[in-house]
Image: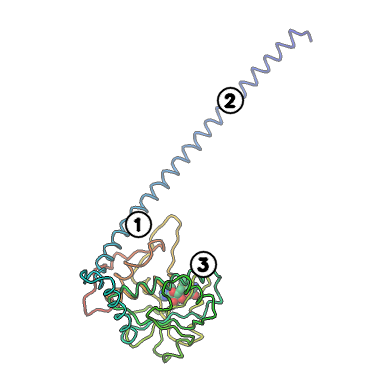
């Protein structure tokens, strides 16, 4: 082949190559455009869903704050004329009185062996919050930390992390709840109980399992209650709440000890499970008060609004 012919053929091939590439690019561009619009649609759909979830969360938070504000008629706001020192003394006195007359609640700390160091630290923090809620309450509970030994990591964490832990107005003991109370008086609260808690009675002793659930150890508190052969009860979540759709499709009825305690405190003050759950059930757990239940305080004679 002469040089001119060879050059011509090579030019033709180059042209064909460019055309083929151009065709390929067109198809790719079309495919990219389709992919792109699919992605845009998917993003728009997700964005709308997130917006709706945020809106509903904001609404819940607003309602929650409203209830909290209504409940803020604690001694601190009732007596704005008192100095901090006097208020502290009043609180201390109220807590001390609750240790003889208040509704009784134990936190069973016998299961710390089942927890990691991180979980133990978190439990210490939850106990601080639980105590803080009791301090602020108009009608505090008689609190007892049972099975708490001084040579444990939990005890050390409580002293290290919780200012004034050694002076908390509550009982701490190495004994368990059955060393202190008759078995028929004890109601062990566990999310896995069949029976729903109806009310909170002065002649009963309520026990919370001192557990933090990062590694989710199922039915530990139920087994502990069975070991003690005592009655069990769960919070009446199914009776007052329904699942709410959420992006992660996450629903859980397992709460932290301080959250369960806040619910019990509000129920004992208002007599309304709806109000107590509305105020304290964490928004992220995927449940809302069912539409048939009103969050207004229950009539005075009613202990339960379900
Ligand atoms: C984080 S939970 C522990 C969950 C753990 N998986 C268990 O075995 O129960 C800590 C404690 O809070 C109380 N608790 C949490 N959610 C509850 C619910 N829905 N009803 C009753 N008690 C609950 C129980 O006393 C429980 O032992």
Front tag of 1 and 2: 1
Q: Would you name the residue on which mark 1 appears?
A: 57
Locate residue 166: give its quadrant. Answer: bottom left
Mark 1: secondary structure: helix
Q: Are marks 3 and 1 in contact (CB under 8 Å)?
A: no
Label located before the other in sequence (1 or 2): 2
Q: Is residue 174 left or right of residue 143?
A: right
**Residue 62 location, x and y as percent?**
29, 59
Residue placed at 21% from the left, 78% from the top? 300
Locate residue 303: give its quadrant. Answer: bottom left
Using the numbered discs, state the Cα–Cα distance from disc 3 to disc 2 in whole angstroms. Answer: 56 Å
Residue placed at 32% from the left, 65% from the top? 290
Using the numbered discs, state the Cα–Cα distance from disc 3 to disc 1 in whole angstroms. Answer: 24 Å
Label located before the other in sequence (3 or 1): 1
Q: Would you name the residue on which mark 3 appears?
A: 214
How packed mark 1 is, by other alpha carbons closer than 10 Å (few <14, some 14-19, many 20 or more), is: some
Q: Would you name the residue on which mark 2 appears?
A: 23
């Amino acid at each position: 082949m002469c040089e001119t012919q060879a050059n011509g053929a090579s030019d033709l091939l180059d042209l064909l190559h460019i055309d083929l590439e151009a065709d390929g690019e067109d198809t790719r561009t079309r495919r990219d455009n389709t992919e792109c619009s699919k992605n845009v649609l998917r993003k728009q759909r997700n964005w709308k869903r997130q917006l709706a979830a945020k809106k509903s969360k904001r609404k819940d938070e607003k309602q929650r704050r409203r209830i909290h504000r209504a409940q803020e008629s604690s001694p601190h706001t009732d007596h704005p004329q008192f100095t901090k020192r006097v208020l502290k003394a009043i609180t201390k006195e109220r807590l001390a009185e609750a240790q003889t007359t208040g509704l009784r609640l134990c936190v069973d700390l016998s299961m710390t062996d089942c927890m990691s160091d991180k979980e133990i630290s978190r439990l210490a923090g939850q106990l601080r919050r639980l105590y803080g809620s009791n301090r602020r309450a108009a009608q505090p509970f008689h609190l007892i930390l049972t099975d708490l030994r001084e040579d444990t990591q939990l005890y050390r964490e409580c002293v290290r992390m919780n200012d004034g832990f050694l002076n908390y107005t509550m009982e701490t003991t190495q004994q368990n709840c059955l060393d202190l109370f008759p078995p028929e008086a004890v109601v062990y609260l566990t999310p896995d109980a069949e029976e729903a808690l109806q009310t909170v009675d002065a002649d009963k002793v309520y026990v919370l399992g001192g557990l933090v659930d990062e590694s989710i150890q199922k039915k530990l508190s139920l087994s502990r209650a069975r070991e003690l052969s005592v009655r069990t009860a769960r919070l009446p979540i199914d009776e007052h709440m329904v699942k709410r759709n959420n992006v992660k499709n996450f629903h859980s009825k397992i709460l932290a000890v301080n959250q369960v305690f806040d619910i019990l405190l509000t129920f004992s003050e208002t007599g309304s499970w709806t109000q107590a759950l509305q105020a304290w059930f964490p928004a992220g757990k995927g449940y809302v008060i069912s539409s048939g239940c009103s969050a207004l305080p229950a009539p005075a004679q009613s202990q339960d609004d379900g």
